[in-house]
Image (cartoon, helix red, strand yellow):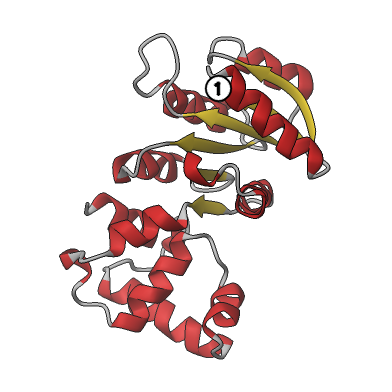
Amino acid sequence: MRLIIVDDDLLVREGVATLLRGAGHEVVASAADPVAVPALVRSHAPDVVLVDIKMPPTYTDEGLRLARGLRQHHPDVAVLVLSQYVVASYATALLEQSPERVGYLLKDHVLRPEVLEGAIRRVASGGTFVDPVMVASLLDGDGSLGGLTEREREVLRLMAEGLSDRGIADRLTVELTTVFTHVQHIFTKLDLPATSSDNRRVRAVVAYLASR
C-alpha cells in the first residue's frame, strides 16, 4: 500500500517508515506538520495517511482536524490517527463524522508490527479501528452499558475493535447466528433503530465512547 506519515517527531517518522517498508508498503511521503499534507495527498494519492494527534503549531488537536479534513475532501483515502492518549472524545470525533476508513491507534502499539499492520489494513479496506486497549478501558465499569449482558459487552468491545460478525464469531468460537443475535440485542438496548442511511454498528460504538 501507499502511505503518508505525518508526525512532528523525526524519530517517530523514520521508525514507522522503516517498519512499514519492512512490511512491504511504500511510504510515498512524510511531513512534520499538517500544512503540507493536503498537497501531498493530491500529489501522491496514498491509500492511508498516518497522522499524529498533536502537532504544531498548538499541539492540541491538529491531527484530528487534519483527519476530518482529509475524510471530507478525500473520502477514498483512509486515515489512521496515532495517539498517546486514551481519550474517548478523540475517537468519537473521528467516528461521528466519517466512520468508514478511519482508525485510532495508541502509539504504544505502533512498534508492534502485527497491530500496526492490522490497523492499516482494516481502515484501508473501508473499516473502522479503535485500539483494543482504549476499548477495554472504556468498557471497564461503564454503568451506561448496564443493560447489556456480559457477553453483549464482549461483543460490543469486539465491534469497537472493528471486527465483522464473522470475525467476532471466530474470536469467541461461537456460531455466526449467535453473534448476529447479540448484535441485534445491543442495537435494541442502546436504542439504535434501523434507518436507511445510518450505520448502526458504528453508532453503537460511538454511543458507548460518547457516554464516557
Q: Looking at the rendering, which quadrant does residue 43 occupy?
A: top right
Mark 1 surroundings within 10 Å by alpha-carbon count, few (fewer than 14), some (14 through 19), many (20 or more): many
Q: Is residue 80 above or below residue 188?
A: above
Q: Is residue 129 above or below residue 6?
A: below
Q: Nearer the viewer, residue 195 or 140?
A: 140
Q: Is residue 191 above or below residue 68?
A: below
Q: Position of residue 13 (x, y in %)?
A: 63, 24
Q: Looking at the rendering, which quadrant does residue 12 occupy?
A: top right
Report whether 115 appears left or right of 47.
left
Q: Is residue 33 above or below residue 72?
A: above
Q: Residue at x 63, y 31 (%)?
A: 49
Q: Position of residue 185 (x, y in %)?
A: 35, 80
Is residue 86 in view? yes
List the residue tagged with mark 1: 7
Q: Position of residue 211 (x, y in %)?
A: 22, 54
What amino acid is at disc 1? Asp
Is residue 25 in view? no
Q: Position of residue 135 (x, y in %)?
A: 38, 58
Report whether 135 appears left or right of 104.
left
Q: Residue at x 66, y 49 (%)?
A: 113
Picture mark count: 1
Q: Residue at x 56, y 27 (%)?
A: 70
Q: Nearer the viewer, residue 31 or 147?
A: 31
Task: Locate the N terminus by quadrant.
Answer: top right
Hey, which residue is sitting farthest left in the picture? 143
Dot 1: element: loop
Q: Nearer the viewer, residue 7 or 198?
A: 7
